[in-house]
Image (cartoon, rainbow, N blue to C red):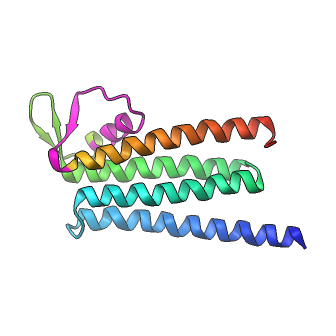
Amino acid sequence: MREKHAGTNERVCWSILAAIYLILWIVPAMAMRGQLRIPYAGLGILILAIGASLVLVYMAVRFRMTWPRFFAFLLLQLYILGLYGLLYAKAGLSDAGGRVLRDLPSGIYFSLVTWTTVGYGDLSPLPHARLLAASEAVLGYLFMGLLVALLLQWFRGGD
């Protein structure tokens, strides 16, 4: 009987995760269409991503870490990097020469540099997008720490 409930609980977790992934796509889409201000989109992504990471951590601890759960965690990270990259392309970035860049490759690059908290300094967010960059840096710290913790728990055998 317990195994039946464990399977049901895991399906509920995957359903919640799928819903969060869908909402994570809607928030930046609204920002791209001008229906939501860029800083608020960043806060929305931050809150939703923390929720998704908590679901994934709960699944890893409760049901043990598996390859599908690990790849779901990595996919969530890549997904969020891409969403932030889209928002940076919309908001614009300033290069060292003061030019404003609004292209997707620069947005993705800045997103990766911000996520990993490297901060080369060659690009910076425009003033209205600073809160967006700060929210991504917080997520980068959170997710890198969770990634290390999940890998350690997995390799130790979940004890």
Q: Residue at x 27, y 46 (%)?
A: 104
Residue sitting at the far right:
1
Give 116 or 101, whichever is nearer the viewer. Answer: 116
Please state, as top left, top right, bottom left or bottom right, where the C terminus lies in the image: top right
Q: Residue at x 22, y 33 (%)?
A: 123
Q: Magenta stretch? A: 107-128
Please state, as top left, top right, bottom left or bottom right, where the N terminus lies in the image: bottom right
Q: Is residue 55 magenta?
A: no
Residue sitting at the far left:
98
Q: Residue at x 16, y 44 (%)?
A: 126
Q: Is residue 127 magenta?
A: yes
Q: Is residue 44 left or right of residue 75?
A: left
Residue 128 lies, in percent from the top left, at: 17, 50
Residue 143 lies, in percent from the top left, at: 51, 43
Residue 83 lies, in percent from the top left, at: 37, 53
Q: Can you tell which quarter of the image residue 122 is in?
A: top left
Residue 124 lies, in percent from the top left, at: 21, 36
